[in-house]
Amino acid sequence: MVLGFLMARAGVDVIVLEKHADFLRDFRGDTVHPSTLEIIHELGLLEDFLKRPHQELRELSGVIGGVPVKIADFSHLPSHCRFVALMPQWDFLDFLGTHAKRYANFRLIMEAEATDLIENGGNIRGVIADTPQGPLEIHATLTVGADGRHSIVREKARLPLEEFGVPIDVMWLRLSKRKDDSAITLGRIAAGLIFVTLDRGDYWQCALVIPKGGADTLRAQGLEAFRAAIVRVAPDFANRVPELQDWDQIKLLTVKVDRLRAWCRPGLLCIGDAAHAMSPIAGVGINLAVQDAVAAANILAPAFARDAPTLDELKRVQKRREFPTRMTQALQMAIQNRVMTRVLQSTSNPKPPFAVKLLNAWPFLRRIPARLVGIGFRPEHVHTPAAAKAALVP
């Protein structure tokens, strides 16, 4: 959606396909980091964006073995927004779609699921989609796969994929919020348990981190054992876990970390999770995908003004974005393998690691993780112009 908006704004004819009838999906990435908020500011839309219901996270804190700790402080970031905005992804997508539709050369087609690619002489020439009205063929100069970690576009393009072992999965759920709850988002760590809570205004979006493949074992133990596990790591939720009455209220996220060796072919490019599935650690996946989109627009929009992007220009997108992708994934995997695995295997309450003790004791050190989470390794900025021929819809 971000790439479609930027390309339409630059005067390129764009069609965006969404396989569902709406954007309403629970437990999607809902953290909009300062790097993404800066892009929204550069587009002149920040004031309008912040009018939408959201919460503002200005620090990251946690409880490790019963000890409260502070880990990151966003208040010193070199950004217009020194906080992480917590906003449901459907609201973010609706916001982007609303502004993109102002351009006459932008078209959004709902209930259109990409099923195959149109190929001619080794070049990708468009996409085939299933719609309620029947198959739809869309011929395009450039097809972009932004269809997530289970990308059909990536599969049909036969792009080589490198997968990395991941030791965790995540069980997502909701619990009600009380007036006397702390407004600070917390990660709680206890013996064999990791529990994360995200403030969603009138409820908590919660994540119980479990060993890879452990969901079936948890379900076999029953809901009562699941509720008891939450209470062990987060005792203040004891009066709310009875709200969990059915396994349908609890959604499994099978965590994957992978990366395409080649993000493109002639006429085709993959970005976001379609190019590199991220761990949910720190909620950076959506923001890395947005950065991909901005970089792609910066590189490719001028090519459309000339004729069409060459394969070399498509490769430039990967070259630009591969370094931050590799660095972010390496950091996530280090946390998964060296911290989370040990915690999940532990039978006794962990103590805060030395590095966390330093962050807790010296506030200025919290600027380092805040920079890594909030800004990332290579933040992008909007360089695509608002072209004169990108006529606004009256």
Image (cartoon, rainbow, N blue to C red):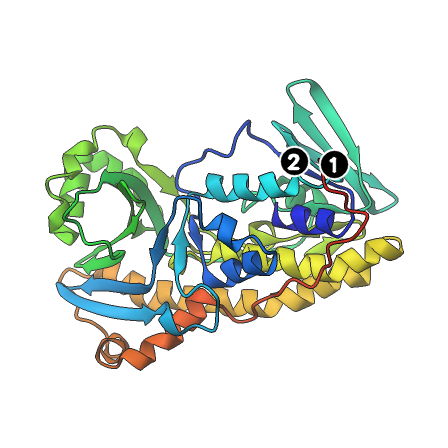
Residue, disc 1: 127
Residue 231 position, x and y percent, is 13, 47
Q: Name, please, the residue furthest toward the front.
A: 394
Residue, disc 2: 17
Residue at 42% in and 64% down? 332
Along the horizontal axis of the image, is 153 left or right of 75? right
Q: Amino acid at mark 2?
A: Leu
Contact, mark 1 vs mark 2 (Cβ under 8 Å): yes
Residue 346 position, x and y percent, is 19, 61
Q: Earlier in the sequence, mark 1 or mark 2?
A: 2
Q: Give the image quarter of residue 374.
A: bottom left
Residue 156 position, x and y percent, is 69, 41
Residue 172 position, x and y percent, is 32, 42
Q: Relative to the observer, which residue lies in front, 382 or 243?
A: 382
Along the horizontal axis of the image, is 370 left or right of 182? right
Helix or strand or loop: what does disc 1 sit on?
strand
